[in-house]
Amino acid sequence: MDNDRIKKMLININGKSEEVKIESNLTELILSKGLCAEKVVIELNLRIVPRQEWKNTPLEEHDSIEIVSFVGGG
Amino acid sequence: MEDVLEIAGKKINNRLFIGTGKFSSYQIMKKALEEAKAELATVALRRVDESSKTENIMDYIPQNCSVMINTSGARDAQEAVRIARLAEAAGAGNWIKIEVIRDNKYLLPDNIETLKVVEILAKEGFITFPYMSPDLSVARRMVDAGASAVMPLGSPIGSNRGVKTRELIEIMVNEIKLPVIVDAGLGRPSEACECMELGCAAVLVNTAIAVAQNPPEMAQAFAQAVYAGRLAYLSGIPAAGKFASPSSPLTGFLREAKKS
């Protein structure tokens, strides 16, 4: 196995196709994006994933993810 | 005078609700909420961006101010329901201002899609506040569907044009048993006062405060106007007459000849 090459896969994050490491989970994804876990909500393939399940939720190729947070609004 | 607006068991003293969009900073927004002594503020939900890494708007909402999530950005019922569920999962509670808009020019709400959202969310236990065009028939359906209040617009969002829908809002106030809360278009405190004089339960203001030169002071001005209008409504506003009616006594004029 070639250790220098980390295997990647394509997933869709907030409407954009992105490469992520295979076998990564939601917690790792949020960390890698520099986001604060307490401030965001994740919807994976249209299902809201509770924060406590992030660690045990692996990502799969072509997953569709929405990461949202609160902003000012009327 | 004790005058409390009670919605879903929550007691609200301040009938000025404030939207949190368009402020130049979260600090200024916080100051405005504090100066107005706001008890209810709306926030929106969006995809994360770079700013999500540093600032969280929720940290700037004063402690005694509750939040209501609005579903702005939703173009149909399904999207609005999705936003409401996401907001609840994020721990923002279950008070939802339902806003479904397909029209980008006037930002007028789609009453039919909005009604569908109320039907779905009210059954799930959400406290729903449908933002709507002031239509009595649809408002009655909102009541039947389980809405907790109705929010007719005064004029298009962010237009600062005032209560152009006054006649229709008056009808809603007279006929709808739920709180009628005027949302959108109020550009100055006198217009907020006008809504309260009509008997509206509250008003929601965002743009006029957020883009004022001094938002905290404008928030205060709106709060006082809302209070004044409410007090006037409760005090019983006399009917307007066609002719003059003297305020001073009609006897004892200097020119009158003394009868001996």
Image (cartoon, coloured by chain):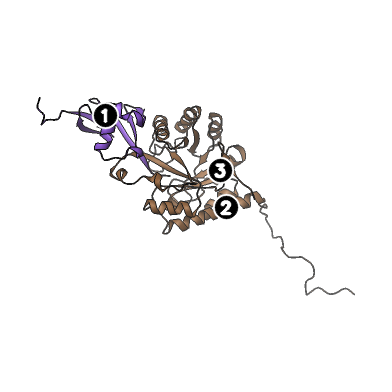
Chain colours: A purple, B brown
Could you tell me which quadrant the N terminus of chain A lies in? Answer: top left
Tags 2 and 3 on a common chain: yes
Furthest-right residue in this view: B260
Q: Nearer the viewer, mark 1 or mark 3?
A: 1
Q: Is residue B160 left or right of residue B234?
A: left
Q: Where, by quadrant of the figure, is residue B70 drawn?
A: top left
SS category of the residue bearing label 2: helix
Q: Nearer the viewer, mark 2 or mark 3?
A: 2
Residue B242 pos. (x, y %): 67, 55
SS category of the residue bearing label 1: loop
- Which is more toward the observer, B28 or B182? B28
Q: Residue at x 26, y 37 (%)?
A: A31
Q: Is residue B250 visible?
A: yes
Q: Could you tell me the amino acid type at mark 1? A: Asn
Residue B204 pos. (x, y %): 49, 46
Give me the disc on residue A25.
Answer: 1
As displayed, is residue A61 above or below residue B259?
A: above
| Residue annotated with mark 2 | B227
Residue B71 pos. (x, y %): 42, 37
Q: Could you tell me the amino acid type at mark 2? A: Tyr
Q: Is residue B144 left or right of residue B106?
A: right
Q: Could you tell me the amino acid type at mark 3? A: Ile
Give me the disc on residue B146.
Answer: none
N-term mark: 2 or 3: 3
Give me the disc on residue B169.
Answer: 3
Q: Is residue A18 left or right of residue B209?
A: left
Residue A38 pos. (x, y %): 35, 38
Tags 1 and 3 on a common chain: no
> Numbered disc 1: what chain?
A
Q: Whole-Å distance between the Cαs marked 1 and 2?
A: 52 Å
> Numbered disc 3: what chain?
B
